[in-house]
Amino acid sequence: MLLSGFCLLSLRDEDIFTYIKKINLSKTKTYLSNSLWTFKTKVATPLKELLQTRKASQEKIPTPAIELDLIEPQIEEESQEEIEQSPPLPIPQILPKEETLSLPKILENTGFREEDIEIQEYFISQPKASKKHHIGFAEQDEIQPKKSPNPFSREELLALSSSHISSSAELLQKIRQDDCKNQPTQSTQQAPRPLSPKKTQQSQPSQIPTPKEMPKILQSTPLDKPKINQEIENIQEESYQEDRIDEFLQEQIWEEESVSEAQEMSEEREKKESFEEVQEEREEIVSSLEIRESDEEELPPTMPKDFEEQSPQELHTLSIQSAPKKYSSAFDLPPQIPQTRTSKVSSLAENEALLSEIDKGEREIPKDYALPPLSLLSPAPQQENTELNEEEIDEKIESLLEKLAVFKIDGDVTRTYSGPIITTLEFRPAPNVKVSRIQSLENDIAMALEAKSIRIQAPIPGKNVVGIEIPNTTIQTIYLREIFESEIFKNSSSPLTLALGKDVVGNPFVTDLKKLPHLLIAGTTGSGKSVGVNAMILSLLYRNSPDDLKLMMVDPKMVEFMPYTDLPHLITPIITDPKKAVIGLANAVREMERRYTLMSQSRTKEIVSYNQKAEELGLEKFPYFVIIIDELADLMMTAGKEVEYSMARIAQMGRASGMHLIVATQSPRAEVLTGLIKTNLPAHLSYKVGTKIDASIIGCAGAETLLGRGDMLFTPPGVSGLVRLHAPWSSEDEVNEIVSYIKDQREVMYNPLFSPEEKESLGAMDSEELDSESAELIARAKDEILQSGKTSISYIQRRLGVGFNKASDIMEKLEQMGFVSAPNSKGAREILGD
Ligand SMILES: Nc1ncnc2c1ncn2[C@@H]1O[C@H](COP(=O)(O)OP(=O)(O)OP(=O)(O)O)[C@@H](O)[C@H]1O
């Protein structure tokens, strides 16, 4: 909120205190700190009434001749955001027409007598441009408040008001001094120095010269530009804090701040104003120096008139006279746009770092099997460059900075990059700017940039910039073949390399499922999930023969994986029934346990070393086993606990045995993506989702602002940031062609042990086949269940003194033996046998 203007009231202390007390301003919610409007409503109006009442009762105080033209408050209890977003309000017309306020004028116009003036209070809140005009008038540096007997201490008043409340006598003296037109010498000594004595002392070690000192420095080294520049930089650095003060004062409206902090800020503000003034004047001198330098003249021995020759009275009058005009012009003028420094980039270091972790090297080529050729995929057609050109980017930057300036957010765009879908502007805010404020302006910025939707990364992880991503006017399609042909995909040695697409600067991006080692995907309908998952499946098919890779596909929607029907890589027919999917997952858990047993027997720790040993010994090798679930929500609705349990088991132990999960859902709700699932599947990938909540559940903030059509956010495990990527497109025809190419070489060979229908025939189901220890536990579990009637896993765990996994296994076996039922949707089982 921009407020402008100032108010000079001449009132008795007790009146102020009475009315501040009467209106019961709380420290936490007062606009006194920053709002002239509220001040007028809550303080000035009642005070005016008081004066009029007093006039009626006591003849000695005449009615004020000036009618304060009070503006009705336009804001009262608005939210901080609303205040921030309010357009600048008009300047209050409270100054007398003459616009020169001197003590005699005040007395003349108001009808007050000198002895009626007890306190002077300034409420100053104005745009940066006009701040310096107050300095000459409002300087209170040497003034110390006298002790007040009233219940409100000065500190408390300072907490209520950011303005300077000084004792009446001292301020009166000040005004008199200012009115003293015929004392140039004294005036010169009182040149604007708004720093308090304390601050002045503090400022000395920092070597920031006062306006008076500065010309001397310049005189001593008239052409020492580096030194001058250094001085200016020092001042600039200090002046960054100014906005922090502004922000503090605005926040003070809402938040209870400590008195000391308020005071400190008030002092800081004075200091900053001083610095700003010093800086401006210094710049003038520097420019005059430059002129002199070019003229090869020496500096004049005297101080510039602005500093030395201008009396406080002149400054005072000048500031009062010009202040309203300056305010007006500050509002009328468009906000100043800082000079931008932009550069285009062709690769992002953070993405490069992720890609550098991809294992590179030779891949094992299957001996009696031909991997599908790239020619089965259509080549990327010649596409027109959709990146924004420099003029368009400049326009966007200008609009962005203009908009941010309206909300008093200073900063600069330091870098831009344009890719196939979006253009990113990296905005470096001034140090005092809260990045959350920029985030909250998302809609306003989108409107200013005329963008359908934008995503704001505030900040870009590991950087001191905020990323503002704007969709390009036209967007490119990324073709799967482009990614398969890229160096990064070709050089990756992992058989489970997945082509994820291109990043925001258009560079191909891949990941290794072995390292993830599982992937959780979310995206609303039509966001590009299936197309993205297809690209992943094709990535696997382009690197692995049916001997090296086994797939289990769960497709409750029945259509998504149809093209892969009878694919030789499938270990079981595509599962479309959620109930069968639950069994399929349980079978996968068993396969994982089987692999672990074999690995422990062969004293190997993971799939690669086991396969090496198996090859040496002529044993069966483990193929990689990837389970792809197209819609998790259906499974969770059918048998949430069972699915959660199986998935958690595979997620926890699958990597070493070569078993991986790719799980997608349209509904990233908490009931679907339970804590257990999310924790165990740490790599998340989100296409456009419906709401912010969905985005936060999948852990991809901002996914609700994505553009659809494969636009996505990826969070690799262990990385704090999100990588924005665009998925590659592959047509159904291409998929069909690739599948038939594979089918031409190999027959499908489903493994009966994994078929949900074959559940009853699975080995190790009868207690006779269990080892003696397990058989004993099963028998004990049966007894416990029959005695207590309780069938929960945790009960068995407690009663038998075994771990949760063991108890869960026992319960599963009891289910397979028909002793207990399968769990219902709440996870409860019935006792069926005895
Ligand atoms: N990477 C992409 N490039 C270009 N267009 C895409 C891309 N991904 C998806 N699309 C477009 O979006 C449409 C929907 O994609 P897709 O079927 O993958 O959505 P979905 O998220 O799987 O939806 P649902 O969950 O309803 O199946 C596609 O038919 C295609 O037109």
Image: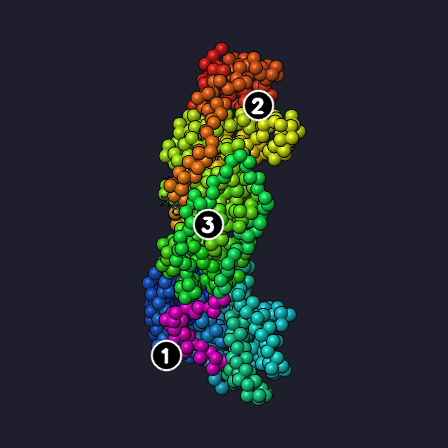
Which picture quadrant has residue 32? bottom left
Q: Position of residue 281 (x, y in %)?
A: 52, 78
Q: Position of residue 311 (x, y in %)?
A: 50, 83
Where is ligand 1, by quadrant?
A: top left
**Which residue is more in the foreground, 506 or 691?**
506
Q: Secondary structure at mark 3?
A: helix
Between disc 3 and disc 1, whose residue precedes? 1
Which residue is located at x 53 percent, y 23 percent?
A: 808
Between marks 1 and 2 in the image, the one whose residue lies nearer the viewer: 2
- Looking at the figure, which quarter contains the N terminus? bottom left
Disc 1, disc 2: CB below 8 Å? no
Magenta-drawn segment: 312-341
Which picture quadrant has residue 289? bottom right
**Residue assigned mark 1:** 98
Which residue is located at x 47 percent, y 26 percent?
A: 750
**Residue assigned mark 3:** 482
Q: Position of residue 753 (x, y in %)?
A: 50, 23
Between disc 1 and disc 2, whose residue precedes? 1
Amino acid carrying mark 3 in the image: Glu
Q: Secondary structure at mark 1?
A: loop
